[in-house]
Amino acid sequence: MTPEEKFMFDLEGYLVVRNVLSKEEVDQCNEVADRIAREQFEIYRDDGLKLARNITLWDPCVQSLIDHPKIIPYLIELLGPSIHFDQDYCIFLDKGGSKGPLHAGTMKSKTELLPFFYTYRDGIMRNGLTTLVYALTPVRKGDGGFCCIPGSHKSNFQLDIPEDVMYFRRPAHYVVQPELEPGDLIIFTEATVHGTMPWTANHERRSFLFKYNPGNTVSWANYYNIDDYDHLTENQKRMMMPPGSHGPKKPPRLEVIAP
């Protein structure tokens, strides 16, 4: 990460990285998505929402995104060298489709915290669950899709966000929707309040979401089985190991190697 990228992530809790995927990689992922049958989606709603999990099993080009060489330096900077690949899925939206309101952050209620976090100490940033969103189609201003409240990962008043703002019934200047080109990437900590605005564009919104944790923590309870995959890289094997930091029966988690 560049010094400016570190500044922006620390300030806002998310970052847009341009041109992470080449046009060829975007085209390959879209060709794969075109082949996916309706029954392979976990959610396929008439209002336009399509969601499927374990998309890394779809095709080697999707599997390769787990440890894409352009993302590894960001993951190490934000999570440390021990990284757990937590889950993957896609969100496709047709015009009028929606996924859900603003959510996450660090506070579940006035008496309970969520397990998401952002910390900084002595020049080191560390995050809990961190999400990477690959854009496969354009996102213009007002199209909808991913949105967030910049800086909310440090807010002490997350529970005071009005309900009509949370459910997108009233626009608020502090809720932003980034513009994206195919191949761009959004990185955000789940400690940042975020959501999916209703999709308004005529073309389909296509996003692949990959989530990572520090190597000793987990969010999604279903672990990966590396036997389900062919030709895993060493980094992919390391990141797919069950989470943990010590114990007599726990194999050592090897550090992820930067390209």
Image: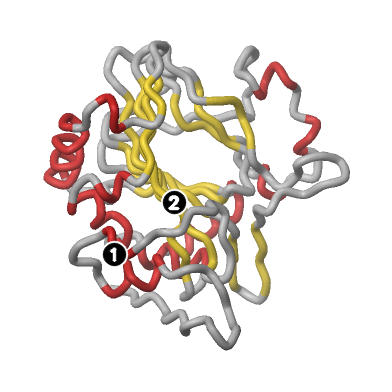
Query: Separation of disc 1 and disc 2 at Cα?
Result: 16 Å
Report the disc number at residue 235.
none
From the image, which quarter does the C terminus lie in? bottom left
Name the residue at the right extreme. Answer: 111
Residue type, mark 2 in image: Gln
- Crowd tier of the residue under label 1, counting other residues whose Cα lies within 10 Å: few below 14, some 14–19, many 20 or above: few
The count of marks equals 2
Name the colouring of the figure.
Answer: secondary structure
Q: Is residue 140 left or right of residue 117?
A: left
- Residue 10 lies in quadrant: bottom right
- Residue in front for this viewpoint, 212 or 185: 212
On residue 227, which mark appears? Answer: 1
The amino acid on which the numbered mark 1 sits, given as a three-letter code, is Asp
The crowding category of the residue bearing disc 2, from other C-alpha atoms within 10 Å (few below 14, some 14 to 19, many at least 20), is many
The image quadrant that residue 219 belongs to is bottom right
Per the rendering, the mark at residue 87 is 2
On the question of residue 19 being in view, the answer is yes
Residue 31, image x, y percentages = 14, 35
Given residues 71 and 49, the one toward you in this image is 49
Q: Residue furthest bottom?
A: 248
Whether residue 207 sits left or right of residue 214 in the image: it is left
